[in-house]
Image (cartoon, rainbow, N blue to C red):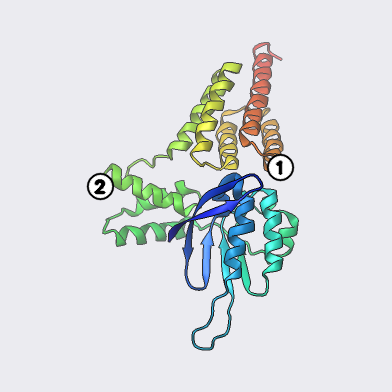
């Protein structure tokens, strides 16, 4: 693992970009979406440079394949994905790309058509328990089976979140208490605060305060689609059955617009504004007995 600085030339200036790579003699792993708005230039320059260098077998002298593993391809802008398609075609003779994505719908069709799609299911709770137990043993920790089961259930198929729960519980109190609470991440508590605010009061002041919290989440590198999804899943259990279909439809509309747009905060804020209007109208009808 290493953090490598790159100088990427844009039409107007040269930008310094730092990317964290995991590499060997035959492969490189990276997340080009970490470059943010410069992801297109990272794909055009950095990945092109890596694809050019083919490994040579020391015994035979033959040139082999260079393997590039790109994580979170669905977070790349459409321009970056289009540039990636051209890179795949140009260097296909000596380079193989493995693209990992959480949402296939966010990957452009020309890129999907050039790949063999393999769906990898999320790990089951039993598999997560095995991962947590294995890490706890290597760290010399005694983990109660009931606590490991609850950590796995709270992770909802996310191994990274399960291991973060283990780390948090270790810092909070050790030896482990079998009945210890599984605390959600701080960003999730922040989303719950936004939901509580918009349910308590539907006004421009509330929307303005929510905008600030959304900005805070975005600048701390929370993916915008995750923020919107968490808002919706937190809202729905608190709503009347009459409101749920409309909220789900609105979320789908703004999620699609967010994928096409450049400023996620606008679309998340627009979703909250639309929700507050509909929730306020519903509350007035209920008060009037309509």
Q: Quadrant of residue 112?
A: bottom right
Q: Quadrant of residue 139?
A: bottom left
Residue 75 locus on image (x, y percent)? 61, 49
Q: Which mark is residue 127?
A: none
Q: Residue at x 75, y 56 (%)?
A: 109
Q: Earlier in the sequence, mark 2 or mark 1?
A: 2
Marks 2 and 1 in Cβ contact (< 8 Å)? no
Going by the picture, which residue comes out furthest to the top?
A: 288
Q: Residue at x 29, y 42 (%)?
A: 172
Camera-nearest residue between 62 and 224: 62
**Which residue position holds label 1?**
260
Camera-nearest residue between 25 and 155: 25
Residue 19 locus on image (x, y percent)? 50, 54
Residue 274 locus on image (x, y percent)? 68, 26
Q: Quadrant of residue 231?
A: top right
| Count of marks placed on residues | 2
**Which residue position holds label 2?**
174
Please determine whether, in this image, residue 65 is positioned above or below residue 193: below
Camera-nearest residue between 124 and 10: 10
Q: Residue at x 54, y 19 (%)?
A: 200
Query: Disc 1 on helix, strand or loop?
Result: helix
Q: Which quadrant holds the N terminus?
A: bottom left
Query: Disc 2 on helix, strand or loop?
Result: loop
């Amino acid at each position: 693992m290493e953090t490598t600085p790159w100088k990427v030339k844009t039409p107007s200036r040269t930008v310094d970009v730092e990317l964290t790579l995991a590499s060997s003699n035959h492969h490189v792993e990276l997340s080009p979406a970490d470059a943010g708005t410069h992801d297109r230039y990272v794909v055009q320059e950095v990945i092109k440079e890596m694809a050019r260098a083919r490994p040579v077998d020391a015994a035979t002298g033959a040139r082999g394949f260079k393997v590039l593993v790109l994580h979170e391809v669905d977070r790349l802008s459409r321009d970056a994905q289009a540039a990636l398609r051209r890179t795949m075609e140009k260097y296909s003779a000596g380079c193989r790309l493995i693209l990992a994505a959480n949402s296939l719908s966010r990957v452009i069709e020309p890129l999907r058509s050039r790949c063999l799609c393999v769906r990898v299911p999320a790990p089951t709770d039993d598999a997560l328990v095995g991962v947590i137990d294995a890490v706890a043993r290597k760290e010399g920790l005694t983990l109660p089976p009931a606590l490991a089961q609850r950590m796995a259930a709270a992770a909802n198929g996310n191994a990274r979140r399960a291991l973060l729960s283990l780390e948090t519980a270790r810092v909070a109190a050790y030896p482990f208490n079998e009945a210890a609470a599984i605390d959600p991440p701080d960003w999730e508590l922040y989303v719950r605060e936004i939901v509580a605010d918009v349910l308590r009061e539907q006004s421009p002041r509330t929307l303005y305060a929510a905008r600030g919290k959304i900005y805070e989440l975005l600048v701390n590198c929370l993916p915008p689609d995750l923020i919107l999804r968490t808002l919706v899943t937190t809202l729905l259990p608190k709503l009347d059955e009459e409101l749920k279909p409309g909220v789900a439809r609105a979320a789908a509309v703004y999620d699609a617009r967010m994928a096409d747009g450049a400023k996620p905060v606008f679309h998340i804020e627009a979703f909250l504004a639309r929700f507050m209007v509909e929730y306020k109208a519903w509350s007035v009808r209920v008060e009037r007995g309509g």
